[in-house]
Amino acid sequence: METVLETTTTAPIGLTQGAMEQLQLIRRQENIPEDHGLRVGVKGGGCSGFSYILGFDMPQENDDIFEVGGLKVIMNKAHAIYLLGMEVDFVNGLDNRGFTFNNPNATSTCGCGTSFSA
């Protein structure tokens, strides 16, 4: 049986300009193939119950594919309930550098900012 992947038009998440610039830089530096998209998701674990997944990957069978700012974003269909409305940013300050997640579905987050409960 052949798997057909669909691209939908309404993205459940947003990427700031800073996040887009950093992701494009990572793609160039790591020579990530054009057929890979940015996987955004969640996994069990972390000090608050869930941790974020962020990395380049190939689409899989249960994925939705979105376009955000010209970037292909991949998300497992089951993860949308936890990520709907989330914004991914990249900060580069004196005391903090990295991707941050502003998730309106999180009922609490841990101090590291990469773990949450919903």
Image (cartoon, grey):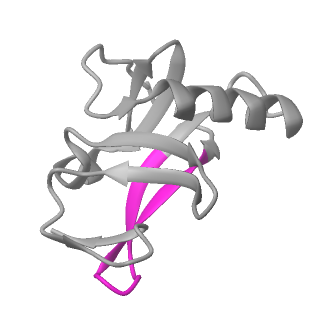
- When the figure is inspected, residue 70 is found, relative to residue 53, above or below; the finding is above
- What count of labels does the image hold? 0
Residue 111, position as x, y percentages in the image: 38, 78
- As drawn, the residue found furthest toward the bottom would be 47
Query: Residue 44 lies in what quarter of the image?
Result: bottom left
Task: Judge left or right: residue 48 versus residue 16.
Answer: left
Magenta stretch in the rendered image: 40-55
Q: Which residue is drawn at 52% across and 12% down?
A: 70
- When the figure is inspected, residue 101 is found, relative to residue 37, above or below; the finding is below
Task: Judge left or right: residue 31 versus residue 105.
Answer: right
* Magenta span contains residue 105: no
Decide if residue 62 is in sight here: no
- As drawn, the residue found furthest toward the front would be 94
Q: Residue at x 65, y 34 (%)?
A: 23
Residue 42, position as x, y percentages in the image: 37, 61
* Magenta span contains residue 42: yes
- When the figure is inspected, residue 58 is found, relative to residue 51, above or below; the finding is above
Decide if residue 35 is in sight here: yes
Main secondary structure of the magenta stretch? strand
Front in this rendered view, residue 70 or 19:
19
Task: Judge left or right: residue 80 versus residue 66.
Answer: left
From the image, which quarter does the C terminus lie in? Answer: bottom left
Q: Which residue is drawn at 44% across and 29% down?
A: 16
Q: Which residue is drawn at 55% across and 31% down?
A: 18
Residue 75, position as x, y percentages in the image: 39, 42
Residue 10, position as x, y percentages in the image: 24, 18
